[in-house]
Image (cartoon, rainbow, N blue to C red):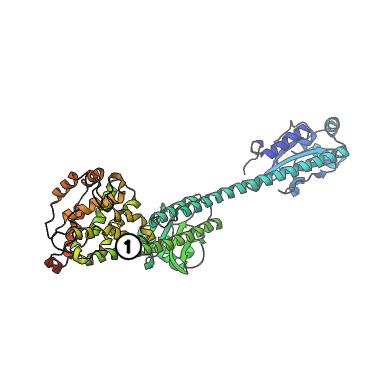
Amino acid sequence: MDTVTTTRLSPALLTVVERCRELRIPSAILDERGAVVESLGRGHTLSEKLMGTPLFHRSIEGLLAADRIEPIELWPGCWILMLPILSRRRCRGYLATAFVTERFLGAEQFRLVCDQLQLDADAVAAPARRQELMGDTEVRRIASLLRWMAEDVQQQTEHSGEIEVMSSQLGEAYEELSLLYQIATKMTVTQEPTDFLTEVCTDLHQVLGLRWLTLQLSDTHDSLNALKGWTHSAGQCDLSGEDLRIVGRELMQRFSRGGAAIINDIQTLEIPRLQGVCRQMLIVPLCQEDQTFGVLFGVERADDKDLSSVDSKLAHSLAQNIGIFLDNAILYEDQQNMFMGTLKALVNAIDAKDTYTCGHSERVATLSRQLAVAAGLDDRTCERVYLAGLIHDVGKIGVPESVLTKPGRLTDEEYAIIKTHPRLGVRILKDIRQMQDLLPGVLFHHERYDGQGYPDGLAGDNIPLFGRLIALADSFDAMSSTRTYREAMPLGKVIQEVRRCAGAQFDPHLAEVFSTLDFSPFQSMIEKHRKRQSPLHKALGGSTREAKT
């Protein structure tokens, strides 16, 4: 049993000790059974001496109670007050005060106390009358004062406890709200799903303080696409990867409905791979529209505290957010696939008019993105450059096939028709909101850095960046491809031509970056597209003509 001394008293009880000293009321610290542990006076007064006797100890045994704070007349003319000393809501002892009146000197207990102390009763009574005896009126006043003091102390203790609990709850609530806010801010459709799920798992593991936590998605839901069977663990997991997946599948089957569950005895699950691994487990099914698509499960807290309903509610809230995020991510992926399908349909429409240039748009798109990456542009911009490259020639749909596929050189009139395809492309795409930022690449990919290009004769940096990037890739592909009027130029000669035209036809900085690219992926695409070209079209010698650019 821990010994309670003044060094372990709360500030409120220390205040009572100081007030008793000022009022010359003796006090002592008792243990939880009522025995004196420490006297807080000089030990000379009758009140102090009597608190150390076996008679006092036996008399108060039936009065010990953590919630009793009123002054009690223990014996005739002898009053005591015992204030409980609480630690973690448990009574560890008492702060006791005592005072006596003239009536006590005539009581039987006074004689018994003196006998136990082996003192002469008359010798004790004389100094007591001079120094510490009080009148009945004064006793009542002091009793009321002590009662009020005790009530104040109790209220302070209760308020301190409430404040401590509230502070702890506020701290936990802050962590929970902070986590929910962080997760909500990351729930964007452009966020990489695996990055989001990894962060959710890691953050929840830290906030709950679990030994380890795993987030596992179903491997049977086709709607999850590439996320089928995805698993991530935070903390030091005691299971192998395969065992973890087996446990996750079993939990998905058993906990396919309802909210979070806390399993206090892991034996009740009867899952062999969990035996001896943990004592307690938190399980949260990931559900959406009555379908279970995953599970979140983790084992007991690292601080050995039991998991609580607060923990399960937080995990359940995050599970709902995960469901919303995955729904949105799947919908966004479907929309992106539809968007890309539309773009590729446009590209295929161009190839259908002139299959000799089959794959031209795809190669220009890939080269443009490769150049954008090498130039240090951000990931999103690089992807938008790629899309602009895919559709840069969409306006050729509006160019007559007689001009578009004419073998040999074009007349000035025919070349003027070819030069309309950038504006035709913009007219085709201008009402599609998601393509507005791609239009500069469509409209200006035939502008020249020296201002001699078309359709607007822009020069230098007045040409939008997408136009300058695609212009390089477009010309490079044209020089690297075989035409009816010439063979494809060797790679080294094409790069020399790009450098020669830097500052005239091409942005000089981009031309320098372009010449350092790895062209092996481009050459592989050339070979792949060559195999896809129609043998009949080759025999006819069809070709797209922009010979004057």
Left or right of 313 on screen, residue 430:
left
Disc 1 marks a residue whose amino acid type is Ile
Is residue 40 something that shows in the picture? yes
Left or right of 421 on screen, residue 196:
right
Q: Position of residue 162 (x, y in %)?
A: 65, 48
Left or right of 59 on screen, residue 316:
left
- Tag 1: Cα neighbours inside 10 Å, few (<14), some, or many (≥20)? few
Q: Position of residue 429 (x, y in %)?
A: 34, 61
Residue occupying image coordinates x 62% and y 46%:
164
Is residue 229 something that shows in the picture? no
Q: Nearer the viewer, residue 65 or 289?
A: 289
Q: Position of residue 347 (x, y in %)?
A: 27, 63
Outermost residue toward the front in this view: 413
Give the position of the N terminus as an image quadrant: top right
Q: Position of residue 185 (x, y in %)?
A: 47, 53
Q: Nearer the viewer, residue 163 or 62?
A: 163
Q: Is residue 472 above or below residue 129?
A: below
Residue under pointer 1 = 428
Left or right of 249 on screen, residue 459:
left
Q: Is residue 228 above or below residue 521?
A: below
